Amino acid sequence: MIAEDRKVHQFKGLSTDQYEELFSNYLINSWSYSKVNTFSRNEKAFEMQYLYNETTKRSSSTIAGNAYHEALEFYFTNLKVGLIKDIVELQEVAYQYIKEVPSNEWKLQKTTPTIEQCISQASKNATSLLANFISEKNVYEFDEILHVEPYLKEFININGVDIPLPCHLKIDLVVKKDGKIIIIDHKSKNKFSDEKEIALSSGKQAITYAKGLESIINEKVDEVWFIENKYSKNRNGNNQLACFKIELNEDTRALYEALLYEPLKRMIDAVSNPDYVYLLNDSDNFVDKAEIHAFWSRTMIAEVDDFNIPESKKEIIEKRLKKIRDTSINNISPVAIKKFKKNASEFIQFNLNDKDMTNEDKIEHVLRTLNVIVKVNTKLEGYSSDTYLLEASSGTNLGSIHKYKLDLAHALNVPSIMIKKELVIHNEQSFLAIEAPKKRKDLLEFDLKHLQDKKIPIGVNNFKEVVFWDLENQSTPHALICGATGSGKSVCLDSTLEYALASGIDDVVIFDPKYEFEKYENNPNISVYSDIDDIESMMELLVDEMNRYVRSHKKNLRLVIFDEFADAVASSKKGKDLKVYDLQVIGHYKDGREKTKLVHVDTKKSLEENLKILLQKGRSTGLRIAAATQRASVKVISGDAKVNFPVQICFRVPKEIDSNVVLGEPGAETLTGKGDGLINSPEYTDLVRFQGFYKK
């Protein structure tokens, strides 16, 4: 270990309660080099980004650089285990990253006034960066890869002082060369940095990385390399990659720690004081001046819920906002503040978020700039999303609106929107419907008034219509429910079960491998099985009973809930474990004793096979199955599996491909979580968005 770090950091090893008390004294919970750098450059920009979480939009060149980083992480992760990836594979990673950037994170500019043009420019720049890397990757010369993209959050010592907040950082690459530990930082540039300037300005970044890494390894970092990749082509034919090396000896360490400590201490002092006034630097070329002025005016009149502030910091930020508002209103008329905000927003050329426009105005405006004339006839307010009904002027190609969905999402300041494929009828008139997510404020509580016979309420759409799963409809016997953690999947299963019991279904079987339905174990109408052996045995009994019902033409409405069925199938018996052996007499010894042998007499069906049989044949006997899983992969939800689940319910999933697997089309990746869902059912002509019920 390095000598000055031998003593234990005074803030390490605290209890959870002690950490909560410590963090309650600060407006942020951690520091990083980027936070210190932003604070030094422009305190108001720091306040906007890190206290109020108002992230600035990213230009196409910035996103191209992020995509380049993503591709290099993929390349070096594979290289670490001896696999070499080619440029096509790297491009696919970069293009996928660009594709998944939320619409409201793109920064529109004069040269890229639409999202489509932004994506095109980002893809072009990323292609250039990767081509440069492949042709000049010998710049990355080392003996061994130690770590790829390690994420650290550690308390560290700077300039001999224990910093009271942990430092969080993500290091691009850690390698070993000639016995030295080297940190490598990838950078994408329009032009190369000045070498002398890097030695000073990047020294603070280098020492932050080194101290962070050294806090978890037992070795000293010797050098930090900044490898710049220039996406604009050199006319003189020189190399597109340049490596700038910073050596960390005792002298440079002391210098860089001293240079870092001063702005770091000032930043820590500021975030420990809720009343600190953050200064605005009008000479800062790294931020949009109109954007920062518009933010400044918002803090004088806005409420805490108007910002994306973590729950743990809401109380302290709310007190800060109240003081700002009280002081500003006493000194400046609110009318003057609003007028200043409006004037500032006029200079934000391609961003409608700060304009005094309703969402209806924004939709009409952005489409008009793209030569599509529409009028928003109606706005329907939902729980997790709002629906806008558009009527188009005569001769307008409604299909053209679909290709501008990214620009509409950008105008509404949401990650993405959904546009219905089919026209919707409202008040006996047809409209094109646009659904935009929003911050949910209310819960849709479970209520028995929505129950109609055996039609199980799943949720409510934005037209205030209840969405059902009809257990008595032969075309909708089984439901597949999918969604990531926290999306609302388990809550949906709970409310479905409660509605089913209330409808009079008195025969329910629950397969619960995650032990989340134990509260129903004492209900006489419900059988709960959690152990995998019990699940397999009961599934066999269900198949046998179903076969008897089929032969005798009997019918009994029974609901089977199978939570996390993919995990249960993965851990169930397979192959030779399904073989049944019997001890049989195969002869006799001379003394008359029987000679026996275990003989393979049968092979049981696997859990997956039995589930498939129930799905295919159970509908005629009254069996209804609701199967849920987090794993939206084609291995789990194959084409055959989807055929057996006519009703597909999907809550938020991580990626577009997951939505395609479950629903056959994208959309679920854009949901807001906590019950915001989509249902695909023979009872509905189009994909229906709904808010699920919450059962306390």
Image (cartoon, helix red, strand yellow):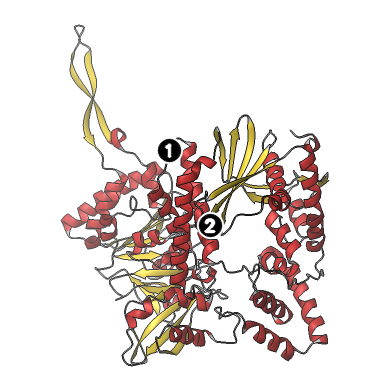
| Closer-to-camera residue (250/7) | 250
Which tag, 2 or 1, sits closer to the chain's start?
2
Which kind of residue does numbered mark 1 sit on?
Leu
Residue on which disc 1 sits: 83
Q: Position of residue 142 (x, y in %)?
A: 56, 35
In the foreground, 571 or 19: 19
Q: Is 20 situated above or below 360?
A: above
What residue is at 57 percent from the left and 79 percent from the top? 353
Q: Position of residue 317 (x, y in %)?
A: 74, 70
Quadrant in the picture for the N terminus: top right
What residue lies at 72% left-to-right and 43% top-to-bottom? 211
Query: Mark 2 Cα within 10 Å, few/some/many (few <14, many 20+)?
Result: many
- Which quadrant holds the C terminus? bottom right
Q: Residue at x 19, y 56 (%)?
A: 550
Name the residue at the top extreme. 590
Quarter location, residue 332:
bottom right
* Numbered disc 1: secondary structure: loop
Query: As displayed, is residue 635 above or below residue 401?
Result: above
Disc 2 target residue? 66
Residue 111, position as x, y percentages in the image: 50, 73
